[in-house]
């Protein structure tokens, strides 16, 4: 029996095979649908009223290559689950990125309306700390296309330079406040 997909037909090997009776295919489907815990004994136990004996199912299993067909079916289903997982993961990432941008827009709008002279030294330092952290993360993200070693060196250099600039500005603001 050819277990590969027939190029002239659009059928998969886990679908009904040529010459396979309706009852034999139904028994295969019952076996297939048990998944990782499948066994012929489970099919016999569940469908005893169908008069499917162990001997009959073993004969059908051998004749119609149930094990190989199930391996192909399991592999196909795993690929389908992986595709669905990827679609869902990308959708979640897109949604979270959009929400993060909205939150950033709201925060930036609010921050731009703040008068720095009304902030305490502790609040200024906290804004500085958060700003530096976000800047480092943004710079690291922007250099991911280069090699890891180069991007790490470049990011560290830029982050240090930006951190020094921000720190100097913050110290200047603190000195102005006296």
Image (spheres, grey):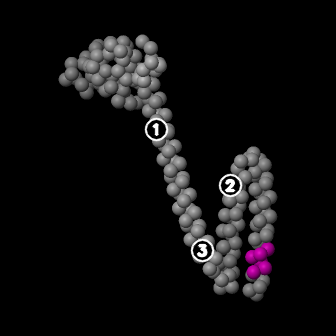
Residue 64: percent from left, percent from top: 37, 15
Q: Residue at image x 38%, y 19%?
A: 66
1 vs 3, front mark? 3
Magenta residues: mostly which secondary structure? helix
Work out whether mark 2 precedes mark 1 in sequence or the reverse, and give the earlier one.
1
Residue 31, located in which quarter of the rendered image? top left
Residue 67: percent from left, percent from top: 41, 20
Callout 2 crowding tier (Cα within 10 Å): few <14, some 14–19, many ≥20: few
Q: Residue at image x 71%, y 61%?
A: 136
Q: Which residue is disc 1 drawn over?
A: 81
Residue 53 is a magenta residue? no
Q: Which mark is residue 167?
A: none
Q: Which residue is disc 3 drawn over?
A: 109
> From mark 1 to mark 3, how far is it between C-alphas?
42 Å
Q: Which residue is disc 2 drawn over?
A: 141
Residue 37, located in which quarter of the rendered image? top left
In the depicted structure, whether residue 151 falls above or below residue 29: below
In the depicted structure, whether residue 152 falls above or below residue 106: above
Q: Which residues are magenta?
A: 168-173
Work out whether mark 1 precedes mark 3 in sequence or the reverse, and give the earlier one.
1
Total tally of numbered discs in the picture: 3
Circle 3 SS class: helix
């Amino acid at each position: 029996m050819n277990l590969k997909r027939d190029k002239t037909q659009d059928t998969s090997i886990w679908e009904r095979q040529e010459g396979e009776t309706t009852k034999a295919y139904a028994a295969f489907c019952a076996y297939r649908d048990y998944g990782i815990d499948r066994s012929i004994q489970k099919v016999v136990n569940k469908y005893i009223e169908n008069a499917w004996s162990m001997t009959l199912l073993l004969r059908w299993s051998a004749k119609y290559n149930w094990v190989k067909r199930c391996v192909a079916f399991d592999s196909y289903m795993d690929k389908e689950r992986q595709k669905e997982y990827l679609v869902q993961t990308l959708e979640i990432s897109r949604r979270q990125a959009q929400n993060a941008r909205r939150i950033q827009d709201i925060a930036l709008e609010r921050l731009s309306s703040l008068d720095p002279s009304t902030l305490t030294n502790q609040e200024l330092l906290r804004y500085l700390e958060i700003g530096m952290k976000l800047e480092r993360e943004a710079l690291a993200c922007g250099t991911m296309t280069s090699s890891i070693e180069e991007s790490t060196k470049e990011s560290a250099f830029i982050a240090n330079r930006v951190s020094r600039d921000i720190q100097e500005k913050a110290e200047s603001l603190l000195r102005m406040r006296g």
